[in-house]
Image (spheres, rainbow, N blue to C red):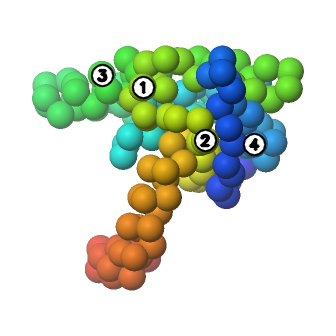
Amino acid sequence: MSHLLIGEYEHTLDEKKRVSLPKTFRAALGKRVVMTRGLDNCLYIYSHGAWAKVAEKLQSLSIVNEDTRGFNRFMLSGAAEVEVDGVGRILIPDHQKEFAQLKRTVVFTGVSDHVEVWDAAKWKSYKARIEKDADKMAKKLGEIGAL
């Protein structure tokens, strides 16, 4: 991974379901990205290189496990290759817009190897919850040696 994707940016969907991808993310992700359903009802955007690594990991999991099959279907069937246009906008496919319940204002968040796209109201609510629980989460991560 060449760029660590970080930060939070708010943008507005236009009437054609296009939204400007933040400039800092555009540089790291490239002209064609892969967007898919993510966890917590947001969308994930990956560069082609990062997506290839995710897809490879998913394909390496055993298909005999029902959870593995379900998660592969969730991530892979929901994916779409999306082009970043000349002015830096992306078109969000209808099925993804519906999944993430995106309204007019969306928030892009950088999360290491991918970008998440959230409905602004949902992000505000989720962020308030995780900020309140950050100390508890850190303690749990410390107990398992992750921090």
Question: Is any part of residue 145 visible from this angle?
Answer: no
Residue position marked by numbered label 1 in the rendering: 98
What amino acid does circle 1 point to? Glu
Q: Quadrant location of the N terminus?
A: top right
Residue position marked by numbered label 4 in the rendering: 22
- Counting residues from the start of the chain, the first of labels 2 and 3 encountered is 3
- Counting residues from the start of the chain, the first of labels 1 and 2 encountered is 1
Q: CA distance from mark 2 to mark 3?
A: 28 Å
Q: Residue at x 43, y 59 (%)?
A: 125
Which quarter of the figure has residue 21?
A: top right
Q: CA distance from mark 1 to mark 3?
A: 17 Å
Above or below: residue 52 compared with residue 145: above
Above or below: residue 128 compared with residue 7: below
Above or below: residue 75 compared with residue 80: below
Report whether 77 appears left or right of 108.
left
- Secondary structure under badge 1? helix
Q: Residue at x 65, y 55 (%)?
A: 8
- Counting residues from the start of the chain, the first of labels 4 and 2 encountered is 4
Q: Residue at x 39, y 82 (%)?
A: 135
Badge nearest the viewer, 1 or 3: 1
Residue position marked by numbered label 2 in the rendering: 105
What amino acid does circle 4 point to? Pro
Identify which residue, 103 or 85, lies in the foreground. Answer: 103
- Counting residues from the start of the chain, the first of labels 1 and 4 encountered is 4
Report whether 110 appears left or right of 41.
right
Badge nearest the viewer, 2 or 3: 2
Badge nearest the viewer, 1 or 4: 1
